[in-house]
Amino acid sequence: MTTLLRIDSSLRRDGSDSRALADRFVAAWRRRHPDGQVRIRDLAAEPVPHLDGATLAALATAPEARDAEAAGRVALADALIAEFMAADELVLAVPMYNFGIPSTLKAYLDHVARAGVTFRYTAAGPEGLAGDRRVTLLLTRGGRYTGSPLDHQAPYLRTVFNFLGITDIQEVVAEGLNIDADSRTQALAAAVERLNGRKEAA
Ligand SMILES: Cc1cc2nc3c(=O)[nH]c(=O)nc-3n(C[C@H](O)[C@H](O)[C@H](O)COP(=O)(O)O)c2cc1C
């Protein structure tokens, strides 16, 4: 069965443009995959804790030597990775926060990018182990940052997913949402058009 993992990261539950784009994406995906399964990981509703020293230590401890607390930390990280790897396709709804991504999403990615599991180091350099899945990035921004060196949202996400071996990355950007009403209307219309597949991204 085809599985889509939807990852939300906007702190806004109501009135979130990235979530609205994800709703549209998922509705279209369901039409294309009537028997498919959609899993939702909402990082605002259920934030993943920061990857901390105790979790790193737990991961480095042999399973039989972990106490209950350490085992719990590893179980959470393992569950996140299992969910990620079980997905044939991922869609991430990501607002730009302070030029980058929401910290909850960074914490999530810190758990998912694990040496020996989702990537490995080889003599020839790092090798991603999570290829063979498509990622769609739904990126929202109050200002306009496409092509700007200040954009640490799209390039960062591309880098991380490439690092994990994922090369099939689609992007839908809705930016300039907080500039004025016209800018917002045009940006959302263009994003929806792109989502509907009628227009290729620039
Ligand atoms: C904490 C915070 C930081 C933000 N930082 C930026 C930023 O650096 N650049 C930008 O263009 N917009 C910034 N914004 C605006 C959001 O990116 C914009 O409103 C986006 O559409 C929010 O997506 P959402 O509607 O899914 O929540 C910020 C918003 C918040 C709440």
Image (cartoon, rainbow, N blue to C red):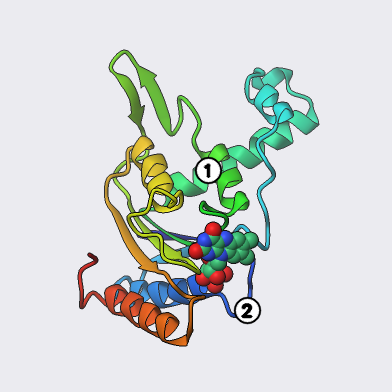
At label 2, counting other C-alpha atoms closer than 10 Å, the crowd grade (few under 14, some 14-19, many 20 or more) is few
Query: Which is more N-terminal, label 2 or label 1?
Result: 2
Indicate left or right for 45 with 165 as reference: right
Q: In this view, does 187 lie above or below 51?
A: below
In the foreground, 35 or 51: 51
| Residue 136 - label | none
Instruction: Tell me the amino acid under the disc marked 1.
Output: Leu
> Marks 1 and 2, Cα distance to the nearest angstrom?
24 Å
Please name the residue shown 32% across and 43% down the image: 166
Quarter the C terminus occupies: bottom left
Kindly indicate whether the residue at mark 2 contacts the one at mark 1 (C-beta within 8 angstroms). no
Q: Is residue 164 above or below residue 147?
A: above
Please name the residue shown 31% across and 78% down the image: 190
Indicate left or right for 135 with 69 as reference: left
**Image region (quadrant) for ligand 1:** bottom right
Residue 200 in the image: state x and y as whole percent. 20, 69
Judged from the image, the secondary structure of the residue bearing numbered disc 2 is loop
Q: What is the count of numbered marks?
A: 2
Q: Mark 1 points at which residue?
A: 109
Q: Name the residue under label 2.
A: 14
For the question of whether residue 117 can be seen, the reply is: yes
At label 1, counting other C-alpha atoms closer than 10 Å, the crowd grade (few under 14, some 14-19, many 20 or more) is some
